[in-house]
Image: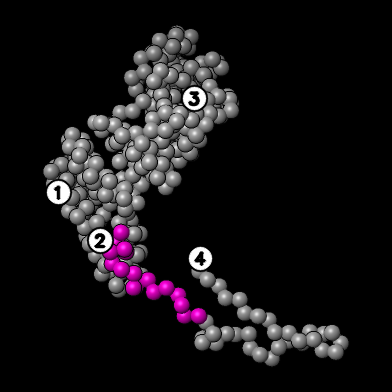
Amino acid sequence: MKQKTWPDRSDASPFIAFPFYKSNDRDGKIKSSRRSSKPSLSSIPTHAPDFSALPFDILTKIAAPFNFPNLLAASLVCRSWKEALRPLREAMVLLRYGKLFKHGRGGVRRNLEKALDSFLKGAARGSTLAMVDAGLIYWERGQKEEAIALYLKAASLGDPAGQCNLGISYLHAQPQNHKEAVKWLLRASIGGHVRAQYQLALCLHQGLGLDRNLQEAAKWYLKAAEGGYVRAMYNASLCYMFGEGLSHSHRQARKWMKRAADRGHSKAQFEHGLALFSEGEMMKAVVYLELATRAGETAATHVKNVILQQLSATSRDRALLLADNWRALPSSR
């Protein structure tokens, strides 16, 4: 699913307090009580909830979005939980096999049919993670109804990735359903899913499914950017640059543009290269413009060549070597 990165202008555990016993003598001095302040076992309330009595269907719904470490921890709570969560632990194994087949890792040859089969078996055991992965394969195959059905099931069980993918699917389905898209994107965004936060910001920016609101759009761009989403970093920079939804700030615009550029956003590399060129930082400008050129930003080529003509042969070689050795910083993409 390719989306525009910037909208076109046209378009606690309970505690018990025990009282201190004190009595005053005739001189007003406080005498310590002879009664022991240590509570007896019978004085401690026994109304703590018995989690082992939680119905299995509710437990499995709660644990459906769990990853393996959280699922393993929940299985160690008590024997009944361990038994109830057995299908989800089996789903984790199937999920792992599915990923091996999908990506061709661990000495396993890539096989999407076997990957899908593993994901569907994991989904049948209640794992929302497997539902989402199976939905992705269906979507890539063009089987959008099957994908949306799996995303909806995962989303209804509270899986943020399922909610995000469902929202995006409604944006691209035929016919489109912007209101449903915004509803699910908002749920995932509140849950901290950075891609959903970015997509929600785009909807707010373009007025899809709700009224256009630049302030709210900028807020979600910034939230996603702070969570490491590169496209949101670029858009947050533009918000600061043009004063759209955020107060104009050259410093903040520059900060987020560089962060996006350092994480591989080609347009940000071009923009940051231009900024460095305007400030006389020729060597650094060439590095970012060269990276942008290699990523397909043809407009960066002309500016880069103009700068290279002004540099010595040694400086040119040094700049291109830096570009060759450059590696993008980690991000949420």
Local crowd size for mark 1, using a 10 Å CA cut-off: few (<14), some (14–19), many (≥20): some
Measuring from the top left, give residue 313's x and y in whole percent: 44, 13
The amino acid marked with disc number 3 is Leu
- Of the numbered discs 3 and 2, the one sitting upstream in the chain is 2
Q: Label 2 sits on what residue type?
A: Arg
| Horizontal and vertical percent position of residue 100 | 20, 47
Q: Position of residue 236 (x, y in %)?
A: 49, 30
User: Which residue lies under the disc numbered 3?
Assistant: 238
**Residue 12 image label:** 4
Q: Where, by quadrant of the figure, is residue 326 drawn?
A: top left
Residue 99, percent from left and from top: 22, 47
Magenta span of residues: 45-61
Please state which amino acid type lies under the numbered disc 4: Ala
Residue under circle 2?
Answer: 89
Nearest to N terminus: mark 2 or mark 1: 2
Q: Residues within 10 Å of mark 3 (few under 14, many from 20)?
A: many
Give the residue at mark 1.
117
The residue lying at 41 percent from left, 35 percent from top is 200
Tag 3, which secondary structure?
Answer: helix
- Tell me what residue is drawn at x 40 percent, y 15 percent: 300
Q: CA distance from mark 2 to mark 1?
A: 17 Å
* Nearest to the observer: residue 90 or residue 148: 148
Cα distance in 3D space between marks 2 and 4 = 28 Å
Whether residue 89 sits left or right of residue 29 in the image: it is left
Q: Residue at x 39, y 26 (%)?
A: 5
Q: Estimate the spatial distance between the alpha carbons at disc 3 and disc 1, rounded to whole Å.
A: 44 Å
Front residue (pair 330, 26):
26
Q: Where is 83 relative to 304, above or below? A: below
